[in-house]
Image (tube, helix red, strand yellow):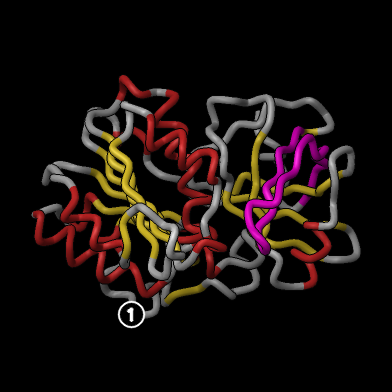
Amino acid sequence: MSLNKENIFFPQQAEIIETKWLNPTEKHFVLKLKNNEVFDFQPGQIVEAGLPGWGEIPLGLSSSPVNQDSFELVVRKVGKVSTALVELNPGEVMYIRGPLGNGFPVEEFTGHPVLIVAGGIGLCPTRSMINYILDKRDDFKKFTLFFGSRDIDCRLFTDDLCKWEQDENVDFYETMDNPPESWDKNKGVITTLFAKTSIDPDTRVIICGPPVMYKFVIKELRKIGIPDEHVFVDLERRMKCGVGKCGHCQINNKYVCIDGPVFRYSDILGLEEAI
């Protein structure tokens, strides 16, 4: 049973088990439901996280659903709600609604090569699918992961990055736009990583990152021959209420929080505001 499928408007309490600052603006939380229910979700889904008197914000889940004892979120400190949330510490409570929206269609990835292209904070929601693939590694063919960040302060989950670099189960490549002099990895925008490896045209692809990144990644995928219907994009940055009531995430006839946040790229080609 997941949080509260009977009433998506009703938040439940989640106890904070662990916290860690990933960089100067992003804080990582490990949480567990206070009522000890099993937390069941799909990679790519979101929750609404908040505090009474402050409000709530949509956050992508950052952990694999295989571990149902706890779940993980990353909060970027940018507004009043997120500022209040990052002040929370282990033992305190965060209020959660969800899981909400549509996640990645895992069944469509099974038995195929997979490429995940994550830019900056886009690593947070895609980390759920990354760890799910590694948990269920025999279900997938070649797994390739591209991660790009703007500078050293935007680099997230550094322990995971080091682990993936050494893991034979993932073909991992990392780059940085503006690296420090000590940086000994790839330099440049994330699309430069396509020259580092070969990608099968049968690959299923996930893209999540800053809006400017999408069209350039799509261009590279089309060069390889990957059809648009095999490409999935995460648009969770547009969401607010999470239940299709506020209209903040509406793009023509679609609501990101209900129809997404994960979309098949071929389904949103005609929506100019989507990307």
Horizontal side of residue 178 vs 40, given as left or right? left
Image height of 190 relative to 114, above or below: below
Residue that extends furthest to the top in the rendered view of this protein: 138
Q: Which residues are magenta?
A: 10-32
- Residue type at mark 1: give it: Glu
Image height of 63 relative to 80, above or below: above
Few, some or many residues within 10 Å of mark 1 (<14, 14–19, 20+): few
Horizontal side of residue 77 vs 160, given as left or right? right
The x, y position of residue 256, in whole percent, is 49, 64
Location of the C terminus (image quadrant): bottom left
Question: Under tag 1, what secondary structure?
Answer: loop
Q: Which residue is mark 1?
A: 272
The x, y position of residue 169, in whole percent, is 32, 27
Location of the N terminus (image quadrant): top right
Relative depth, front residue between 90 and 229: 90
The x, y position of residue 102, in whole percent, is 48, 49
Q: Residue 251's image quarter?
A: bottom left
The x, y position of residue 221, in whole percent, is 18, 58
x 40%, y 23%: residue: 136
Horizontal side of residue 238 vs 8, given as left or right? left
x 38%, y 53%: residue: 147
Q: Residue 164's image quarter?
A: top left
x 42%, y 70%: residue: 178
